[in-house]
Image (cartoon, rainbow, N blue to C red):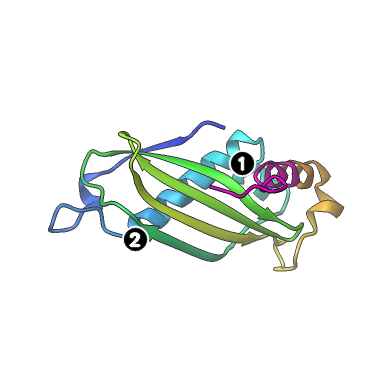
Amino acid sequence: MRKYKHIVQYYETDRMGITHHSNYIRWMEEARIDFLDQIGWNYARLEELGVISPVTEASCRYKHSTTFADEILISVSVEEFKGVRLKLRYRMEKADGSLAAEGHSEHCFLDPDGKIVRLDKRFLDFFRTLTELAQANEPQAGGHRL
């Protein structure tokens, strides 16, 4: 899976020249949109099918500050998927490989009336894709996630 690249914009920085913390959550959204596009289930397609995916939780841990014009490479992976709730993990690195931030977001899938959509019942291909990605990120027996 290709990493999403974001270049820190001047307006994203504060008076001290450091990226304001709220922007990292926005970058996670940008990377999530790119991730869904890469797996063939972009937001436009989902919305055409009558599915919306609201954020139910988001968090970010800041490790190293970023500044104007820094190149940030964002990896997105499926941390957990149980059929109704999707948990994504984000790793944001500077071009030199140093870790800038880590985060996660959780999502559910709803129809236009706000009712839960069971992907395994209505969109089996999407369900299988997310399940495979989640399984690929599970720790191996006797191992652990890094």
What secondary structure is marked by label 2? helix
Residue found at the far front of this picture: 142
Which image quadrant: the N terminus?
Answer: top right
Q: Is residue 112 magenta?
A: no
Identify the amino acid type marked 2. Ser
- In the rendered image, residue 133 lying in the magenta stretch gets the answer yes
Give me the residue at 60% from left, 46% from top. 43
Label 2 crowd (10 A; few <14 / some 14-19 / many >=20):
few
Give the magenta range. 131-146
Counting from the top left corner in percent of width and height, residue 146 is at: 53, 47
According to the picture, the residue beneath numbered tag 2 turns out to be: 22
Task: Looking at the picture, tell me which residue is in the foreground, 64 or 50.
Answer: 64
Q: Is residue 25 above or below residue 44?
A: below
Alpha-carbon span between mark 2 and mark 1? 24 Å
Q: Position of residue 54 (x, y in %)?
A: 59, 62
70 displayed left or right of 125: left
**The quadrant where residue 108 appears:** bottom right
Disc 1 on helix, strand or loop? Answer: loop
Decide which of tag 2 and tag 1 comes sooner along the chain: 2
Q: Which residue is mark 1?
A: 42
Quadrant of res 128: top right
Image location of residue 140, percent across then percent down: 69, 45
Position of residue 88 in the picture relative to residue 130 (left or right): left
